[in-house]
Amino acid sequence: MSRNKVLQPDFKLAFLLPKYWLTWLGVIILYSISWLPYKWQLGLGRVLGRLLYKIGSKRKHIADVNLKLCFPQMSEQERQRILKKNFENTGIALFETGMGWWWPNWRVKRKIKIIGLEHIEKAQQEGKGILLLAMHYLSAEMTARGIGYGHPMVVFYRPHNNQLMEYFQFRGRGRSNKYMLGKKDVKGLIRALKEGEACVYLPDQDYGRNRSLFVPFYAMKETATTTGTLIFARQKNVESMMFIPTRNDDDSGYTFEISAPLANFPTKDDEADLIRVNQELEKAISRKPEQYMWLHRRFKTRPDENAPSLYK
């Protein structure tokens, strides 16, 4: 059994200092709202998202640029429709944080449907580790909490910079999963795969020029794409599968889909393999583009280091 390489954050008396008072206020409000009926919280999230859209922000500009870069043939009207829906989903995501961190088990389980668990079970029966390739959907907190009730996972994640928020985030995400590993603990994830664990990894953000290749992502022909995916996928006895979480359109909850193992993947061709990864991500994201996290600077690293930012 692997030991958790992220030290579980303990409660500190320092959390009671004035520097954390605003964080405490936000946590108390979020915790209180989390007890409201599910559909009420979705409605509040949509209202908040519409307000954020109208106010406008740096994040709105980033999301708009990303949509234009990825879908240049799409009409302005359609892009704006997706952008508005994306902000509604961003508002919902705030309240999903409270749901994911504090809902009781019975309440989470009622909202989760998982398709394709048999692929994980078959691979583990054969003594293999499973690399689940996911994407940054806005429902991440409910996804991290919910997937563990179908099959407890090892989750590769980024610790929160605010130590009090990290205290709550770690406990919330870890309530139904085996353990979590910090994003720099490559050896820890490799060890988990060797031990036959199912591990969630997200290869869809710009992690910088180091250990990246520039391959197509949607209409962007040269997108910095991490080669870290291949470090894990090429471990002995590892199967790579897509993990696609979505929030249901009828507000009934969430559907998590686990694909069959990717055939003929990985190969020995880094570029071809990363193109394949991005193509699989595109297919998944295109199902519900309004639920994807377009608010991050996916194209901040350019092939030419001296090229101006696409987000200015």
Image (cartoon, rainbow, N blue to C red):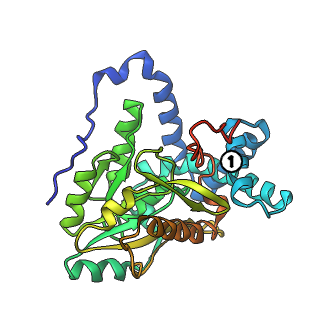
Residue under the image location 65 percent in, 68 percent down: 249
Relative image position of residue 104 (x, y in whole percent)? 39, 56
Q: Quadrant of the C terminus?
A: top right
The amino acid type, in three-letter code, at marker 1 is: Ala
Task: State the residue lying farthest toward the left.
Answer: 1
Residue ID for mark 1:
63
Check disc 1 and report its element: helix, strand or loop: helix
Q: Horizontal and vertical percent for residue 300?
A: 58, 43
Which of the pair 163/219 is nearer the observer?
219
Q: Nearer the viewer, residue 311 or 221?
A: 221
Residue ranking furthest to the top: 18
Q: Residue at x 75, y 52 (%)?
A: 84
- Quadrant in which residue 223 is drawn: bottom right
Q: Position of residue 165 (x, y in %)?
A: 41, 35
**In terms of depth relative to the viewer, which is nearer, 312 or 19?**
312
Q: Where on the picture, by quarter, is residue 222?
A: bottom right
Residue 309, image x and y in percent?
65, 38
Q: Is residue 26 above or below residue 126?
A: above
Q: Label 1 neighbourhood size at 10 Å, few (<14), some (14-19), many (20+)?
A: many
The residue that appears at 37% across and 40% down in the rendered structure is: 159
- Quadrant of the rendering where the N terminus is positioned: bottom left
- Answer left or right for 265 relative to 251: left
Q: Quadrant of residue 48?
A: top right
Q: How many labels sit on residues? A: 1
| Residue 80 visible in the current orientation | yes
Is residue 153 in sight in this rendering? no
